[in-house]
Amino acid sequence: MPYETVHLTGRAGKLAAAAGALVLLAGVALLLFLGSDSKKPAAEAALREAEQAVNAAAPEARRYVPAMVQENLDVLAEAKKQLQRGDYKAALASAVQLKSRADEMVRATAEWKANPPK
């Protein structure tokens, strides 16, 4: 069965490309986390990357999927609290989840723009 390829253009394409790169960086952070004696640097790096992904997608997404933006900001705030408490394992897990949620937010925004509700 042939596959249909979807090509995003413009801002959505750039956001999708950035999101893909951040997934790779999150994976690297996870590997560092698993192989490192100190989990704090990996958790901090993953959280920075996830925060950048959310911040990159949020301005446009706020117009189309505001509830998703707020949910992701709430997850980000909780992940920062986990990091401050020294729960690096939980902070890293939250950062990886947040990165995935940011990617989902980009896709939902592109979908809404392509097929707005009538």
Image (tube, rainbow, N blue to C red):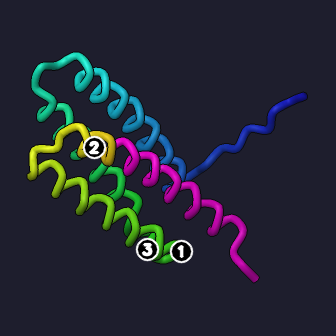
Nearest to the observer: residue 91 or residue 15 = 91
Identify the residue at the far top of this view: 35
The residue lying toward the viewer, choosing from 69 and 71, is: 71
Mark closer to the chain start, 1 or 2: 2
Name the side, left or right, on which 67 lies relative to 56.
Answer: right
Write down the region rendered in magenta.
96-118
Task: Say which residue label 3 marks.
Answer: 62
Q: Residue visible at 46% across and 76% down?
A: 66
Residue shown at the point (50%, 46%) measured from the top left? 16
In the rendered image, residue 76, in percent from the top left (x then y), is placed at: 28, 58
Say above or below: 3 vs 94: above
Name the main secondary structure of what is drawn in magenta: helix
Are there few (<14), some (14-19), or many (20+) residues within 10 Å of tag 1? some
Where the N terminus falls, by quadrant? top right
Q: Residues within 10 Å of mark 3 (few under 14, many from 20)?
A: some
User: Where residue 112 sits: x, y (%)?
Assistant: 63, 68
Calculate the distance from the C-alpha at mark 3 to the C-alpha at mark 2.
Answer: 20 Å
The answer to whether residue 23 is above or below residue 68 is above
Give the secondary structure at mark 3.
Answer: helix
Of the residues shown, which amino acid type is indicated by label 3? Arg
> Which residue is under mark 1?
64
- The location of residue 29, given as percent across then percent down, is 27, 29
Q: Which residue is mark 2?
A: 49
Kindly identify the amino acid type of the residue bearing the numbered disc 2. Glu
